[in-house]
Amino acid sequence: MRLVIPSDGELGEPTMRFLATCGVKVSRPNARRYTGSIPALPGIDVLFQRTADITTKVEEGSAEMGITGLDRLMEYRHDENAVVSVMDDLEFGGCDYVLAVPDSWLDVTSIDDLADLALEFHARGRQLRIATKYPRLLRRYLFERGINYFTLVPASGTLEAAPIAGYADLIADLSATGTTLRENRLKTVDGGTILTSQACLIANPHTLAKQPDDLQLAQSLTEMLEAHLRAEPYYRITANVQGRSPEDVSAMILARPEIAGIQGPTVARVFSVEEEDWYAVSLLIRKNRLLDAVAHLRECGGVDIAAAQLSYLFKGQSQAFDRFLHRVAALNGGPADYA
């Protein structure tokens, strides 16, 4: 199975770090090589491409899966059945695709104001010129809001200088913090967020459906990413608690159900040559309740309390991949039992 990931740019290094933290580190012999592998998942070939090309590579079948920005997927996808999102949010690469106007436009503070301005320009025989790298997304957004009079100015470099340089009146660009916009005397408008984007995992359901081995590798990769993201806010706490019986210890822990674990505590007998009334208690707790849980275990007589952040938390089945399998089944006219 071929997985295509960003070779550089804002998603390049973050993608490599993310995969490494998920336990599927990419091995790349050197920075000039455009291929790599994942030792933890033999059988997956990694291809490095420009972020802007990844959606196309997956859509045309040059790769079965890819990691790209949601903005790139929405802009460059031509067939929604040929490339789909398996996981919409990998929790990195976050940014907003926004409309930004010059600070000097004091009367333009919302998308409605911009719509009125477009009509004024049109009445004077002009059209609003908007510089952007994502014309399809922007055009659809403007049409849906009744803004029909505008000209899109394609741009590939820095957009913030467009109004000052005079080749556009305003811009539509990606912004993570808004700092660059403010430094270039631009401001966003209310209701002007076109898309909230982040890194996502995409796949070609047609090519994967034809290769059961590739589909299995796709499932393994998806499960590793999903389980890691699910585990991130959780800690496992263990402690030794003295009590008359497992039921007695469980009752003490469950007196605070909000910090008694995801589905309650696990209680097991501690075998000791000295005392026979000790039990090991194990809980899964969210990080923001960690100290509360530690305090509660102490109140229950707990000692030797240890806490460790989870690396993976698997459910009975992969929710993300199960949704993808149903999509595969729908597109291929068969049952979703591929895995």
Image (spheres, grey):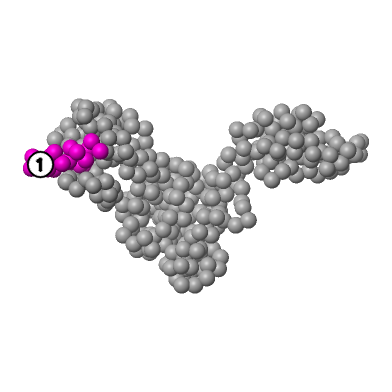
Q: Name the residue carrying label 1.
A: 123
Q: Residue at x 79, y 39 (%)?
A: 251
Determine the residue positioned at 31% across, 60% down: 78
Secondary structure of the residue carrying numbered label 1:
helix
> Could you say where residue 149 lies in the image, as x and y percent from the top left?
16, 46
Question: How would you classify the magenta stretch by its main secondary structure?
Answer: helix
The answer to if 127 sits in the magenta stretch is yes
Residue 21 location (% of width, % of height): 53, 44
Instruction: Identify which residue, 84 or 92, lies in the foreground.
Output: 84
Q: Is residue 246 left or right of residue 96?
A: right
Which residue is at the front of the view, 56 or 31? Answer: 56
In magenta, the rendered stretch is 112-131
Position in image of residue 155 (x %, y %): 21, 44
- Say whether residue 153 is magenta: no
Q: Quadrant of the C terminus?
A: bottom right
Against 136, residue 235 (above or below) is above
Q: In this rendering, does residue 136 appear at all? A: yes
Q: Position of residue 99 (x, y in %)?
A: 27, 38
Q: Nearer the viewer, residue 159 or 265?
A: 265
- For the residue pair 60 and 27, the one nearer the viewer reads as 60
- Residue type at the position of mark 1: Ala
- Rendering quarter of residue 40: bottom right
Taking the spot 65% from the left edge, 32% from the top edge, the residue there is 290
Count of number-bearing discs: 1
The residue shown at (46%, 67%) is 330
